[in-house]
Amino acid sequence: MKKITTLLLVLLTLSIFTTNIYAQEETDATESTEEIIATSGITVSPPTIEISQGDLGKKYTIEITNNTESAVTFTASEEYVQRNDQKQTEIIEREDSNMLDFIEEPFSVAPGETYPFTVRVKLSVASTDGIYPAIAFTESGDESDLNISSQIMTVFLVQNFDGEASVDTNIELGSSMVTSSKVTISGDILNDGSKYYRPTGTIKVLKGETVLYEKQLTTQIEGLLFPNESVDYEIEWENDENPFTAFGTYTVEVSISPTPFSATQIARIQYIYIPIELIGAVIGGIVVLVGIGFGITKLKKKKQK
C-alpha cells in the first residue's frame, strides 16, 4: 500500500515539474488580399501593394471610384507612412520623397465612375526599414461639397531587400493539462527580423511518435506580420483516448514558416497527462486496500482475545 501511495505522489510531482520547451530550425512555406478603402462615398482599391525587388520599374493601376452624386476632383501626392505601436498607419515627413512616378495634375471622377490612376515604382527605390511610400488622394477644387476630412491612399509596401525574414514563437498550456482531457494551447508568433511576411504554421499533438492531432494555424495568423510585431493563437484540444490507456507523456509541437524559402521555427513543449479517472481508480484502490488491511488487523485482534 505504501508503494502505491508513493507511486501516485511521484506521478503527480513529475507531471508538474517535467514540462519543458525547446526550439530547433528546419528548412521549409504571398499574395496581398485586396481590400477597398472608402471615405465619404469614395473608394480606392487596392489599399496596399506589395513590392519585392523584382517589381522595381513596374507600373500599377489604382482605381478611384466615385459613389456619390457629384463630380469630385483629386490631386495626388507622394507621402511616406510607417506603422506605430498601435499597428496603425501614420504619415511621416521625409525629404527624399522620390520613389514613385505619377501624374501630379488634378483629375476629376464623375458620379458613379471609376478612374484608373497609374503609378510606376522607380528602379532607384532603395530598401526601406519600416517606412513605405504611398500615393495620397486629396480632394481639390470648389465644386465638391463632400468635405473629405482625411486623405485616402494606397501604400506601396516596399520590402526590405537587404533584410532577413526571421520568426520566433512560444507555447503555453492551460493549467489543467495534467488531469483534464481538454487542453488549451496558446502562444504568439513574433517577427524578429527586418522583412514583413505572411507566416504559415502547423500545430501537432503527439504521444510518442504517434500524431494524435494536427491543425493548420493559418486562419488565426493570416495577414501580413511586420517587423517587431506579433500575433497570438489559441486552440483547444480534447484527448479522446481511453482514460486508462491515455496516461503518459505528450508533446505539443508548433512549426512556423515566415516564407517558403526561410528556415522553419519549431517549438515543442511536453507534459505528463494523468487522467482524473485513473487517479480516482488509484485512490479507490488505496481505500479498498486500507479497508482490507484494517479488517485483517481487526480480525487478528479478535482471534488473539
Image: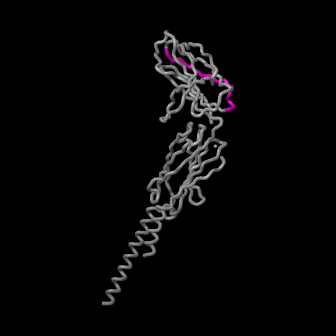
Q: Which residues are magenta?
A: 53-68
Dividing the image into 4 quarters, which one contains the C terminus?
A: bottom left
x and y percent of residue 28 in the render?
Answer: 65, 46
Residue ranking furthest to the front: 95
Work out whether residue 136 can be spotted.
yes
Residue ranking furthest to the top: 143
x and y percent of residue 80 in the render?
Answer: 56, 26
Residue ranking furthest to the left: 305
Dividing the image into 4 quarters, which one contains the N terminus?
A: bottom left
x and y percent of residue 158 in the render?
Answer: 62, 31
Residue 224 versus residue 18 in the image, above or below: above
Residue at 55% from the left image edge and 47% from the top image edge: 169
Residue at 53% from the left image edge and 27% from the top image edge: 92
Q: Nearer the viewer, residue 191 or 128?
A: 128
x and y percent of residue 231 in the render?
Answer: 52, 42
Residue 304, by quadrant, is: bottom left
Residue 295, by quadrant, is: bottom left
Residue 6 versus residue 124 in the image, above or below: below
